[in-house]
Amino acid sequence: MLSVLLSVLAGVAVAESDGATRVALVIGNSGYAANPLINPVNDAEDMATRLQEIGYQVYGDGPMLEQDLRGMQVAIRDFTRSLNPGDLAVVYYSGHGFEYKGTNYLIPIDNEEIQFADDVPDWSYPAPRLLERIAATGATGVIILDACRNNPLPERGGARDAGVGLARMETPAGASAFIMYSAGPGQTASDGEGRNGLFTAALLEALEDPHRRIDDIMYEVSYSVRNATQGRQVPWLEFAFAGEIPPHLQAGDDLVDRNEVPEGGASGGGGKPGRGILSAGVPLYGALALDAPPPPEGLRMDLLAGGYEDAAQLGGACQGFIASNPDFQLSWSEVIGPITLRAESDAATVMVMYGPDQEWICATSTPSLELNGATEGSYRIWVGTMQAIEVAPDAVLVIEPIDAQTGPVAMSPEDHGQGEANEDLN
C-alpha cells in the first residue's frame, strides 16, 4: 500500500471507475451549547445540494443538521452499513473539530459536557472510527473535514495534549480513502464572513466543474484559500490507495481542465517578490510518505512548474526559477528502494532537491534525480522552469523504481549541480 499526505492531491494517472455508486453523508453543526459557529449549517445545506446535483445519493435525502452525539453515531453507523465494495462514499462534516493526543474528534452540538480538553474523547465522535467503518466495507472514502477551527479548551494541570487544528490520520491497511482537511496541520480554518466558510465556499466553486480528478479540484480549492489568507490557511489532502487508481469526483468523460495560475501569478509576471528559498517550507503539493516501492509504471504527480525564486542563489550549477516553498516532500528509506524522480513538461524545466544531509542538488539540462543508497530521511523537491515566464506550465513529477537489471541512468557532470545549504534560505 502507498500512503500520501498532500495539500493538493498529486495527480496519479487516473482512469475513471464509472461503475461506482456515488453516495454521500453530509453533517453540519453550528448551534453548539458552547462556542457556536456561524456557517456550518449553510455549508452543509449547500454541499448536500451540490452533491445531489452531480449525481450523489445523499443519506437522509439532505444534510444532517445540528446533530448531537447520538445523532452523529446513528447517522454514521447507518450510512456506512449501506455501503458496498466499490462505492465512492463522500462524508462531509462542517463544525467544530478537535485534536487530542494525536486523534481527531468531531464535536456534536451537545458539547456542554466538554469543559476541558481531556473531556473530548468521552463526548465526541472519533474521526478515525469513521475511516475504519468505511474501509471495512470495501468502499472508497472521500472524507471532507471543514473542522479545523480553533477550540480554546483549557487543559487540566497545565498538560499540552491538545493541538491546534487537526492531525493527520492513518488509513487502515489495504483501504482506499481520501481525507480533505480545510487547513493544514497546525492551522485553523476561517468560519468565513459570508454564507459559507472560506474552504467550503472555494470547494463549492470548484464543484461547478465536477468532471475532474480529485487532484484538480483540490488544487483549485487550495490555491484559492491559500491566496485569500496569504498562506495562513492551506487545505491539505491525505490519501492512500491499495492497487486502485483514484476516481474522478463525478462520473463523466476523461477531459481534465488545466489549472493555470492567472497571468502575472507565476514567475516573472508582476507577481510578489521573491522571499528566499525555504528548505523547511510547507510543501505546496504535499508530503509523500511511501511505505513500499512505487509500481513499475511509476507514480505521476501533477503540478504547475516554476516560481519567483532564481535557483542561482543556491550556488554551484543551480539555475532556473522555482517556488519559495518546495513542491513536494518525500520521505525516503531503504524499504522504498532505488528510485528516479524526473519532470515532464512541454516547457524547459529544472529540478532542485534538498536532502537530510542539508545539501542542495540541482538537475538542469536533464531534469532527473535519483535516490539510490542515499541518506534516509526527508527530501524537499522543486520543479522549476529554465526561464522566468508569465504563466506557470503544467508539469508532472514522475517517481519510478530503478530497474535492478539496468541500474541507474548515468548523469553527466553538467546535469547535476550542487549548491550549499544557506542558513538564510531556511
Image (tube, rainbow, N blue to C red):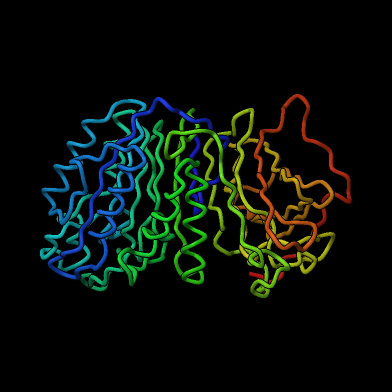
Quarter of the image that includes the C terminus: bottom right
Residue 197 placement, left or right of 74? right
Q: Position of residue 334 (x, y in %)?
A: 61, 39
Asked whether, in this view, residue 335 is left or right of residue 353, the answer is: left
Q: Is residue 366 above or below residue 280?
A: above
Position of 3 compared to 194: left or right?
right
36 or 228: which is nearer to us? 228
The part of the image, by quadrant, that contains residue 267 is bottom right
Q: Residue at x 81, y 52 (%)?
A: 364
Measured as percent of width and height from the top left, residue 335 is found at 58, 36
Q: Residue at x 79, y 51 (%)?
A: 348
Left or right of 182? Residue 274 is right
In this rendering, is residue 213 above or below 8? above
In the depicted structure, whether residue 318 falls above or below residue 299: below
Q: Residue at x 20, y 58 (%)?
A: 29
Residue 102 percent location from the top left of the image: 34, 55
Which residue sits at x=47%, y=56%?
221
Query: For the image shown, how many numbered marks are present on the structure?
Result: 0
Residue 409 spot, x, y in % from top left:
80, 36
